[in-house]
Image (cartoon, helix red, strand yellow):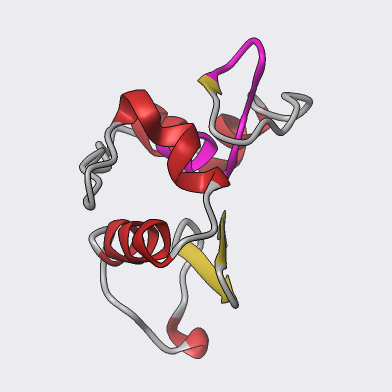
Amino acid sequence: MINLREIINKYVGIPHKLGSWDKEEGLDCISLIYYIYKDFGIDLPLEFSEGFTIDNYKDLWEQNTLRSLKAKLKYVASLGKEIKSKTMCVGDIIITQMEDQIAMGIY
């Protein structure tokens, strides 16, 4: 049986780097969660909106425009459905929005 904690521990020490998908350089919250889920056997979607693609992903997260915020919100909404915090399980993705910024983590 695959242990989520063991998978997550493989990523301890990798630096944070906004917009990066390179495990050597560093990862941001989305790329880190993407790789952890992939190692666990779950493929998360990599489809963005508002003209953003995986190739210009860093631009999406660096921009503070209504267009980029819409794309971020649309993407994170595509990952699942909202649940009450008391029903969360280990491995659930936590999404926090603070004004025009979005942060993600794993419960």
Describe residue 16's horizontal placement relative to residue 64 as left or right: right
> Is residue 1 in view from this perspective?
no
Q: Give residue 14's quadrant in the image.
A: top right
Describe residue 71's horizontal placement relative to residue 14 as left or right: left
Instruction: Say which residue appears at 27% left-offset and 39% top-offset.
Output: 42
Residue 51 is a magenta residue: no
Up/down of 35 relative to 101, above or below: above
In the rendered image, which quarter contains the N terminus? top left
Q: Give residue 83's quadrant in the image.
A: bottom left
Residue 33 is a magenta residue: yes
Q: Which of 5 and 65 is in front in this view?
A: 65
Residue 19 in the image, given as x and y percentages of width and height? 54, 33
Residue 88 in the image, given as x and y percentages of width and height? 47, 76
Up/down of 22 relative to 90, above or below: above
Residue 93 in the image, given as x and y percentages of width and height? 46, 60
Q: Which of 56 and 86 is in front in this view?
A: 56
Q: How many marks?
A: 0
Up/down of 48 relative to 91, above or below: above
> Is residue 61 in view from this perspective?
yes
Q: Give residue 12's quadrant in the image.
A: top right
Residue 97 in the image, given as x and y percentages of width and height? 55, 73
Instruction: Say which residue appears at 54% left-offset and 36% top-offset.
Output: 32
- Per the rendered image, the range of residues in magenta is 22-34
Instruction: Say which residue appears at 59% left-offset and 77% top-offset.
Output: 99
